[in-house]
Image (cartoon, rainbow, N blue to C red):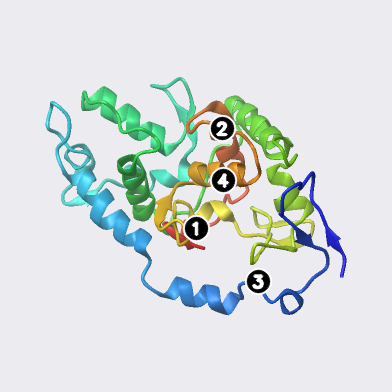
Amino acid sequence: MKVKYIGMLSLSVLIISGATSEEIGQAISPEDWKLYEEGINPGEVFAEEVGGDLFENPMGPKKISCASCHVKEGDVEERVATAAAYYPKYDKDAGMIINLEQRIQICQSKHMDMKPFSLKSKENTALTTYLYYLAQGTKIDVDTRSPMAKEYLKYGRYIFTLKRGVRNLSCQVCHEFAAGRVLRMQWLKPLGFEYNGIKGTTAADHWPAFRMTKNKVQTLQQRFQGCQKQGGQKKLPLGSKEMVALELYVKSLSNGAELKTPGLRR
């Protein structure tokens, strides 16, 4: 059996060319994934108990809550309950395309007069996850047509294909060039519906997700950072134009897929 290195894999990351799960004995089977997904998802508990509480509780010097503005007759208003399906998108307050985590920050600073939760905080992740939880079943529909969206999509694709770091890797190397092969017990798959005839994961439909190996919920951008670290790259800052553009690009690959958030991932 031939072993093929992807990029400059100077440490120990290997892709086994043309190998099947039986030959490797390591790939997690679809049946095992189904068992994981049919169990209790700690991500949903986190969304309800932590994110939901934050949404309801008064915060900041004004002592107002997200719910005080966005709950009408006992229900979260639809534009907020489905908002997660449409981010990243242009925001007039920011004057640029932002993701949902950044929109939460703007609401906190502009309407609640409070210091916003940082993008890496448990609190921001919890509120974000709660909003994605509310949006379960809503079809992803990020903007791909406006001039600014096209600019960000082009830049996101550039970031997706850019090889960098000590291993000379890019997102494209694993999720396009090596799609259909196995790495670290999992099949490498395209991030959209399919690529080059290989069925994809529509990855954006299940993030934020509870990571079993991390024992916590992570957002899509936080997952990007994990991949970057594993690939020997300098992590791009959360909320940077590069990360927002990459998130928009990856999410656009799943346009039309229903959100299944929060997901449950290894």
Q: Which mark is residue 251?
A: 4
Q: Earlier in the sequence, mark 3 or mark 4?
A: 3
Q: Is residue 244 above or below residue 52?
A: above
Q: Residues within 10 Å of mark 4 (few under 14, many from 20)?
A: many
User: Which three-letter amino acid code belongs to the residue tagged 2?
Assistant: Leu
Q: Tell me the residue at 40%/53% (across/down).
A: 217
Q: Which of labels 1 and 4 is toward the front?
A: 4
Foreground: disc 2 or disc 4: 2
How packed mark 3 is, by other alpha carbons closer than 10 Å (few <14, some 14-19, many 20 or more), is some
Give the SS element for disc 3: loop
- Tell me the number on the disc at residue 27: 3
In this rendering, would 38 be left or right of 240?
left
Give me the residue at 76% from left, 77% from top: 23
Q: Amino acid at mark 3?
A: Ala
State the residue position of label 1. Answer: 258
How far apart are the alpha carbons under marks 2 and 4?
A: 18 Å
Q: Position of residue 160 (x, y in %)?
A: 68, 39
* Label located before the other in sequence (1 or 3): 3
Question: Real-space Cα distance between discs 1 and 3?
Answer: 26 Å
Q: What is the x, y in percent for residue 130? A: 32, 50
The residue at the point 31 percent across, 54 percent down is: 47
**Residue holding disc 2:** 236
- Tag 2: Cα neighbours inside 10 Å, few (<14), some, or many (≥20)? some
Specify whether residue 139 is in view: yes
Q: If you read the primary sequence from the N terminus, does the residue marked by circle 2 or circle 4 appear first?
A: 2
